[in-house]
Amino acid sequence: MRLEKRHRQSAFALVLAPVGAVAFTMLVSALLVLWAGAPVTRTYGLLLQGGFGSVFALSETLTRAIPLILTGLAATVAFKARLFNIGAEGQLYAGALAAVAVGGLHSGTGFDQVPMPLLFALMMLAAALAGALLLLGPALMKQRLGVDEVVTTLLLNFIVLLLVSMMLDGPMKDPTAMGWPQSVALIGDLELSKLIAQTRVHSGLLWGAGLALGVWALMKYTVLGFDIRAVGANARAAAFAGVPVTRTVALVAMLSGALAGLAGAIEVAGRTGYVTLDMSPGYGYSGIVIAMLAALHPLGVVLASVFVAGVLVGADSMSRAIGVPTYIADVIVAASLISVLVATLLTQYRVRWK
Amino acid sequence: MPDTVLKLHGITKRFGRLVANDDISLDLRRGEVLALLGENGAGKSTLVSILFGHYLADAGDITVFGQPLAPGDPKASLAAGIGMVHQHFTLADNLSVLDNVMMGSEPLWLAFTRKRAARRRLDEVARQFGLSVDADARVGSLSVGERQRVEILKALYRGARILILDEPTAVLTPQESEALFVVLAQMVAQGLSIIFISHKLAEVLRVSQRIAVLRGGKLVAQAQARGTTQAQLAQWMVGHAIDVPRRRPAPHAGQTVCELRGVSTAPARERLLEASLTLRSGEIVAIAGVSGNGQVALAELLSGTRAAIGGEVHFLGRPLPAEPSQLVAQGVARIPEDRHAVGVVGDLPVWENAVSERLRSTAFSRGFWVRRGAARAHAQHILSAFDVRGAGADAPARALSGGNMQKLILGRALLHPASTAVHTVTPRLIVAHQPTWGLDIGAVAYVQEQLIAARDAGAAVLLISDDLDEVLTLGDQVAVIHAGHLTDARPATAWTREAIGLAMAGAPAGMTQPVEVAA
């Protein structure tokens, strides 16, 4: 068996690919549901209803989608320039810590003179900067020394988590938390407003959507956007055409890290109110999946985030009702990613048996 | 016919709507060199890939020594006695000649290798065909010509009776090519059969007994080499008569535009060593040499992608700017050697590639933002002025054929957007590295005409080429590069082919007497 490059991509294949990918995902998941001894259609129905079926379900899905949009954008921007940032998880935590350091640590001591809108801006800026600086090092090491950024960014995640752990037990420990490892709380005035009363969905959604639009416009309409795409597609040709490659990679790293850092700040300001060690169930890593599902399209990231969040939230409620383990959500997300990747491959290559 | 060793019958291969091979039937006889002539994309590579089992034909069959050949199976082709020498060698540099020859023909499960027997067999094969080579030499230390010999030995060692050579002279000096032709003659005299793939007319007539011409996937002509002319072959290849650019000397050389004085670049695979060169307005300086002798360093130096570590480079009386965008802004037009890997970003649209060099100028951007309207208009202008066909402005650049891609790069380099015309509309200096490599005859003529036209309009042109014919046709002055050293540039008419060949091989410059060439 081998792959032959298709000289032309047929329109039929381009339509068939995503449809086939969805069908394959449903099939694989259905087999597992059957294995778990549950009725397939009812399981899917419950899952869909739990994720999207009511105002409450939808609000939970959107709440879950907010950090995914931001980490998805972080991965998208970096991958476009072929900077493989696997460290969004660490950058998210760094952003969350920075947000609380600015907006919570000194509550009532020194910052109460600062007007709230300014403090809010400072908090977001600090979070973005924390994420940005965290990725700048690996990016420069990649450009200057040829150090593989996959390794460095991945390993930095563990370092950052240990740092968070240290801070939560030390300087940023919440004295009122009865020994639970959590940070001091953010000033109440800095918290993001709720979009719908009685739900958890907050204005971080607008930040996510706005930043997605911004990244899309940056990629399409600006010189930097061209530089990023050119460096990612062919760095040698980009350099020949006069693109400052190292500077572009550094800027991409700052941008990607900043987006992931903002994910942390927005989670703190919109949902948790303080930093804990389990505030992200792997949002940084899910961002990679979402970026790939969206084929690195910034607006596609929003849709992919809502899809993944819906599956995760829906699986929770489905599991309570019918007893299929929530892991089915991970299977669905993973299977859909693999199917989309294979489907994309098949639009470009044909399989020859023998 | 008893002496037919290979018979292709009705071979057809489609890629989507493209018919790469259309009902090709061809015989190869014992003891002959059959040249397979055609432009890029004519279907030569597809045909030999089918023959060697890399591709599966959609229709047709192959008979080797009277036996049908199992399709799509390289092992079957090898076993049937078909050997292939690729243009890019498939040798391990860090192993000896003997190891390379044995590699792949020894069973993997044996605990020991049968080196002694292998050495005996290699010696025997080498002697039989007059291919002397040191079996213990490390391949990395061999010259390109010797490596090619190892490739040929490897095929013969495996019992090849039919040898396919894919553009074998592309990497050789004229003397090495001549030596190869002698070896090939010896091989066919011993009863081997050879398929010789090329797009160079002169060498095809020189080396082969029979010539088959492919065009657009079809076999358009078969002829005996004797009695056929280059003009006739060219007409078959392209389908109509061709005006090949003739030597057209420069009216006069003007002022110095660019000057290299004792320039060296950092040690790398290729470097320059104390190279000096003067480029004048209205003059083409052609650099001949076997690729890999510093051409890349020279081209990159003047393209702004490599720095000098010693010596001086002056451009219009000032030090040469370091950044590609500054070079372009000051009137340096650059045509890189590898158009796919360096010339364009294949995944990005044609229009973005058309303005990529000048994107940072005020013509195409306003601060942070790209002036998409102006950029697209200029791209469209390039596409029509330079007759770029095959894909629109929004298609990815990799969809362009080689010739059209080169026209796009030419247009990008040569056509100033009106609003940034600082000094003149034509560039001051053109750095063209292998500008016609791999192009079809029509595109070659077009590119060469553009270079001549730019020279006549007053540009200084540096042409770096492996193709000696091109160097001698276009160059007003010719210099030779070897191991990073440049000879003095002399008028093209003052060089003989032999002298250039010797300088390419590193003989001391200054030998203009024709010297006897060892075959």
Image (cartoon, coloured by chain):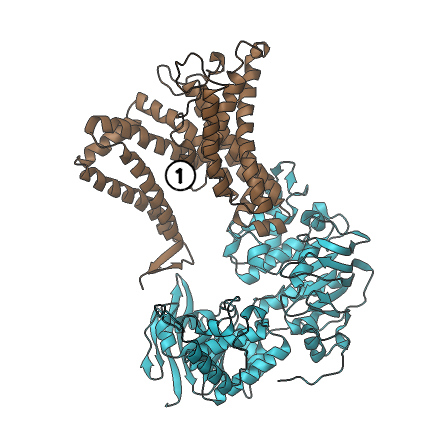
Chain colours: A brown, B cyan
| Residue A317 placement (x, y as % from top left) | 26, 26
| Corner quadrant of residue B460 | bottom right
| Corner quadrant of residue A51 | top left
Q: Quadrant of the C terminus of chain A?
A: bottom left
Residue A60 is left or right of residue B463, and the answer is left
Above-or-below relation of B360 to B91: above
Above-or-below relation of B43 to A306: below
Above-or-below relation of A54 to A301: above
Q: Nearer the viewer, residue B70 or B122?
A: B122
| Residue B326 placement (x, y as % from top left) | 71, 47
Which residue is depicted at the point 79% across and 58% down? B257
- Looking at the rendered structure, the number of numbered marks drawn on it comes to 1
Could you say whether the residue bearing mark 1 is in a helix, strand or loop? Answer: helix
Amino acid bearing label 1: Val
Can residue B202 be seen in this snapshot? no
Q: Which residue is mark 1?
A: A289
Q: Quadrant of the N terminus of chain A?
A: bottom left
| Residue B247 placement (x, y as % from top left) | 71, 73
Which residue is depicted at the point 45% across and 77% down? B155
